[in-house]
Every structure is written in C-alpha cells, then in structure tokens.
Image (tube, rainbow, N blue to C red):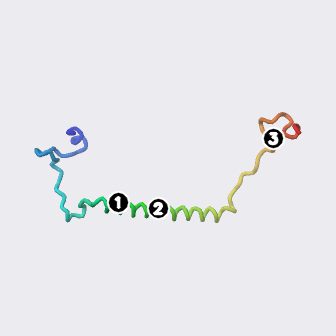
Amino acid sequence: MDALRRLFGGGSPAPDGRNATDAEIDPASPIAPQSADEIDAEERARELELLKAEQERLDDLIVRQQRYADRSWVPPSQGGSRRSDDGEGGADEDR
C-alpha cells in the first residue's frame, strides 16, 4: 500500500493508521457526503435527462431522414438476371 501511495501521490500514513491528507468532513460543507437515496435520485434524474436528450436527437434524425427520403440516391442496377453459378446458357436454358 505504501508503494501505491507514493506512486499516486498519497500522503504519508499517520500513527493512527489514517492518511495525513485525510481531513474530517464538515457536514456544513458543500461536498458533504450524501445519503444513498439522494445519490440514487440524482442518478435517476441525470439518466432521465440523458434519455430525453437522446430521444430528441433521434426524433430530429428521423424527421430529417423522412424529409429527404424522396431525394435519396439509388445506384443504377448492374448486370442482368444471370448469376455466376448459372450454366453457360443461363436460367432460360433450363426451362
């Protein structure tokens, strides 16, 4: 553990086993620990916001695709009905 602390810049351990950089967290500070319920509620709200933004983006994409669907370019068809695994005469010869 000491090697990892030195590698990642952790403080030297204090005699009571805690890191010297560990500070007591003041409950009035803005970074006070939150309860699990508060964290879950914030995560759900963030996920909902992300899903709404993604849905709006996809709706916009679908609308644009439908708007320009009649102008889409289709490559010209190539070749005929004969395929490479057909015999020399093609499909008409077998009938």
Hey, what amino acid is under mark 3?
Arg
* The quarter of the displayed image where residue 64 is located: bottom right
In this figure, which residue is indicated by the disc labeled 1?
40
* The quarter of the displayed image where residue 7 is located: top left
What number is the disc on residue 95? none
For the view shown, which residue lies furthest in the top direction?
88
Image x and y of residue 82, in percent = 81, 41
- From what the image shows, is residue 93 above or below residue 71? above
Label 2 crowd bin: few (<14), some (14–19), many (20+), radius 10 Å: few
Hey, what amino acid is under mark 2?
Leu
Hey, what amino acid is under mark 1?
Asp
The residue at the point 15 percent across, 48 percent down is: 20
In this figure, which residue is indicated by the disc labeled 3?
82
Image x and y of residue 10, in percent = 21, 45
Q: Quadrant of the C terminus?
A: top right
Give the mark toward the camera: 3 or 2.
Answer: 2
The residue at the point 77 percent across, 36 percent down is: 84
Image x and y of residue 32, in percent = 23, 61
CB-based contact (under 8 Å), mark 1 and mark 3: no
**Image check: 51 left or right of 63?**
left
In this figure, which residue is indicated by the disc labeled 2?
51
**Image check: 73 left or right of 36?**
right
